[in-house]
Image (tube, coloured by chain):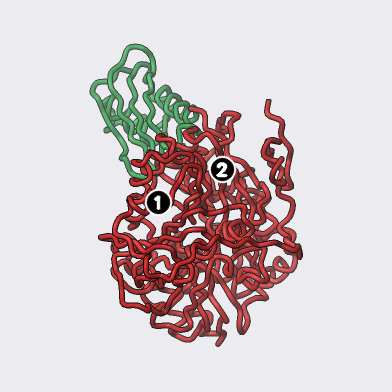
């Protein structure tokens, strides 16, 4: 699916992650800034990528500012950002959830 | 490949460091005969001690290659360290060994500057944090830092391993001959516990004060017989940053739950009886324990013979209420504790040797029943790390951790996870306190008792509602929440040696990979 608008979900609070999605044409490109990057960098990128793919997004620029969020939080924020970017907030894809 | 040998806590120690030190073997000290050293004395009638300029005194006393020391009782409000180091750096003095009781954040940038200038080439400390910890972990200092506990520093000063040439000691009051205490004046901080070692053993003792009082000044914690010079300075420290005001009672439900569980462990242990003794730290949960313990002591009509260590207002309150007979005070963490010392004759100032020196004719920690300590990490062998953060960078201090852990029952109180970082792990990144001296781990989801303490397990099993679990279960539970982290990457280069309280090598810290 096509990104219609740049969208953001999440905060910069401890244990949260802020995900910003904008249009891209070269696959899923993730720019990650994480307080636990050395320990969980690849894992965080993996969760974001899988969640976006499940939401049907194959091309996007992702900016992720992570403050030690757990995987469930990363997934939730990514999905919220995806729905906002796709303009599907009113019609959530329940199967992805 | 670096040639290494494994010590008794399964840590690989590079052989080059085992030429002058042994690897950690046991928490038992035994009864060895120790030879102590004595300082040089420059004879004086005492009429020539007052000096106006730090530069003059530094020029006169500090030479290339010397060992200099400071105390950290002024904590984040310290003005002395940076002033003295500025003078030393600008005089172009080189190759100094810095041997303070500890390093606080306010000193970090100055130490980094002094290392870069070649002024400081060796450091021994209780710990380091912030920009200095980062710099050292990234390899700024050529020679490895030696981390020592407060008890081990006292031991090393006494036996001459640390030979202090010049001690620069900030005090909130002093007379012209150097009689001084920590209790009165704008920069009052209470106990001078760590600085008393330097005053007793340094070849040259320089006091720096903003409060020159009439001779003779009493009570004298530091005595005129120990002091060479008294330097008058504008301000010793910032009172608001030396100690925070009243420490607030934590409202964090997780901290409160842990504190309540720690109290349950204490109360149901065989040690909770008339005349017991304890030490708590300064964190939110530790302070909350003092509150719960107070109520339990009142309910059971039990009084403690002494409370030990770094002292806080809630501990002084117990003293004033008559629930604790004596407070044995090596340092004060807040203004309440610092200012009460002059009024409470039962709040006894003790030096670091009396507090915790393992090679002593009996230290206070040897008499301690219950110690409540914190941890950055604890592993399934109960080894504790209070030194390196989750990224492998130095950001902590041994403090009295290893020393107090010799208590009859040592409790580690810690949350299971902090953000995405597990506290209970398969292997700690740095072993500071060996698991053999840790008895109980209390987290918000369960209590794990060291299997070697079957007596405690049996006692706690009788108590309904105490959630006893194995430490392996806690580790797995933490991993389930946060996931399995990638291993940290280090280079082969050793940036710091972590010594046990007897001087043996318990672990080394490697340079982090960029």
* B46 in relation to B107, above or below: below
Residue bearing the label numbered 1: B60
Q: Position of residue B254 (x, y in %)?
A: 45, 59
Can you tell which quarter of the image residue A88 is in? top left
- Please give the chain letter of the residue carrying mark 2: B
- Which image quarter: residue B271? bottom right
> Residue reaching furthest left?
A5
Name the quadrant of the N terminus of chain B.
Answer: top right
Tell me how far mark 1 sits from mark 2, CA to CA: 61 Å
Q: B59 above or below A81?
A: below
- Along the viewing direction, whichever of B439 and A8 lies nearer the viewer: B439
Question: Mark 2 highlights which residue?
Answer: B480
Residue at 31% from the left image edge and 40% from the top image edge: A11
Q: Quadrant of residue B487?
A: top right
Q: Dot 1, crowdedness within 10 Å: few (<14), some or many (≥20)? A: few
Question: Residue B201's x, y, as percent?
Answer: 54, 62
Q: Nearer the viewer, mark 1 or mark 2?
A: 1
Instruction: Give the chain ID for the red colour.
Output: B
Q: Chain of mark 1?
A: B
Q: Report the front residue among B225 and B443.
A: B225
Residue at 67 percent of width and 59 percent of height: B437
Residue A68 in sight in this render: no
Between B235 and B89, the one nearer to me in the picture: B89
- Left or right of B56 in this view: B153: right
Label pair 1/2, CB-CB below 8 angstroms? no
Label 1, secondary structure: give it: helix
The green one among the chains is A
x and y, in percent, of residue B12 in the image? 69, 38
């Amino acid at each position: 699916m096509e990104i219609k608008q740049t969208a953001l979900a999440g905060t910069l609070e401890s244990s949260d992650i802020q995900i910003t999605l904008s249009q891209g044409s070269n696959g899923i490109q993730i720019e990650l800034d994480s307080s636990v990057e050395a320990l969980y960098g690849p894992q965080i990128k993996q969760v974001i990528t899988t969640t976006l793919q499940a939401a049907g997004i194959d091309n996007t620029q992702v900016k992720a500012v992570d403050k030690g969020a757990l995987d469930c939080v990363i997934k939730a924020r990514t999905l919220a950002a995806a729905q906002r970017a796709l303009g599907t907030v009113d019609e959530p894809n329940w199967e992805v959830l | 490949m670096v040639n290494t040998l494994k010590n008794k806590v399964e840590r690989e120690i590079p052989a080059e460091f085992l030429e002058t030190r042994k690897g950690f073997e046991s928490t038992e000290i035994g009864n060895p005969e120790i030879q102590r050293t004595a300082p040089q004395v420059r004879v004086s009638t005492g009429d020539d001690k007052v000096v106006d300029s730090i530069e003059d005194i530094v020029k006169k006393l500090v030479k290339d290659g010397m060992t200099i020391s400071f105390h950290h009782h002024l904590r984040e409000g310290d003005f002395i360290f940076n002033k003295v180091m500025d003078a030393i750096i600008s005089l172009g003095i080189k190759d100094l060994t810095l041997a303070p009781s500890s390093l606080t954040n306010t000193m970090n940038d100055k130490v980094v500057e002094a290392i870069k200038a070649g002024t400081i080439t060796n450091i021994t400390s209780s710990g380091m944090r912030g920009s200095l910890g980062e710099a050292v972990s990234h390899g700024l200092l050529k020679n490895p830092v030696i981390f020592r506990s407060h008890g081990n520093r006292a031991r090393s000063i006494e036996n001459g391993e640390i030979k202090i040439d010049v001690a620069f000691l900030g005090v909130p009051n002093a007379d012209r001959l150097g009689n001084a205490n920590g209790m009165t004046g704008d920069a009052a901080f209470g106990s001078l516990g760590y600085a008393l070692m330097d005053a007793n053993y340094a070849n040259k003792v320089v006091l720096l004060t903003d409060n020159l009082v009439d001779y003779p000044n009493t009570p004298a914690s530091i005595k005129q017989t120990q002091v060479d010079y008294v330097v008058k300075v504008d301000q010793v420290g910032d009172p608001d940053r030396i100690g925070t005001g009243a420490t607030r009672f934590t409202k964090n439900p997780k901290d409160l739950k842990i504190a309540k569980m720690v109290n349950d462990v204490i109360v149901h242990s065989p040690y909770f009886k008339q005349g017991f003794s304890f030490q708590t730290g300064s964190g939110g949960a530790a302070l909350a324990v003092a509150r719960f313990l107070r109520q339990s002591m009142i309910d059971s009509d039990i009084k403690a013979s002494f409370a030990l260590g770094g002292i806080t207002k809630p501990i002084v309150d117990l003293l004033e209420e008559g629930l604790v007979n004596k407070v044995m005070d090596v340092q004060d963490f807040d203004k309440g504790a610092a200012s009460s010392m002059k009024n409470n004759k039962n709040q006894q100032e003790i030096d670091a040797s009396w507090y915790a020196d393992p090679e002593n004719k009996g230290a206070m920690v040897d008499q301690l029943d219950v110690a409540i300590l914190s941890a950055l990490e604890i592993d399934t062998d109960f080894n504790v790390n209070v030194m390196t953060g989750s990224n492998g960078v130095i950001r902590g201090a041994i403090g009295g951790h290893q020393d107090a852990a010799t208590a009859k029952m040592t409790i580690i109180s810690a949350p299971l996870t902090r953000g995405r970082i597990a506290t209970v792990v398969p292997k700690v990144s740095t072993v500071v306190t060996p698991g053999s001296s840790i008895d109980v781990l209390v987290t918000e989801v369960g209590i794990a008792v060291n299997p070697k303490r079957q007596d405690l397990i049996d006692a706690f099993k009788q108590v309904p509602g105490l959630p006893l679990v194995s430490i392996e279960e806690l580790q797995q539970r933490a991993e389930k929440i946060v996931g399995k982290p990638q291993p940290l990457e280090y280079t082969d280069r050793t940036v710091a040696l972590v010594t046990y309280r007897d001087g043996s090598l318990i672990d080394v810290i490697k340079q982090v990979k960029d």
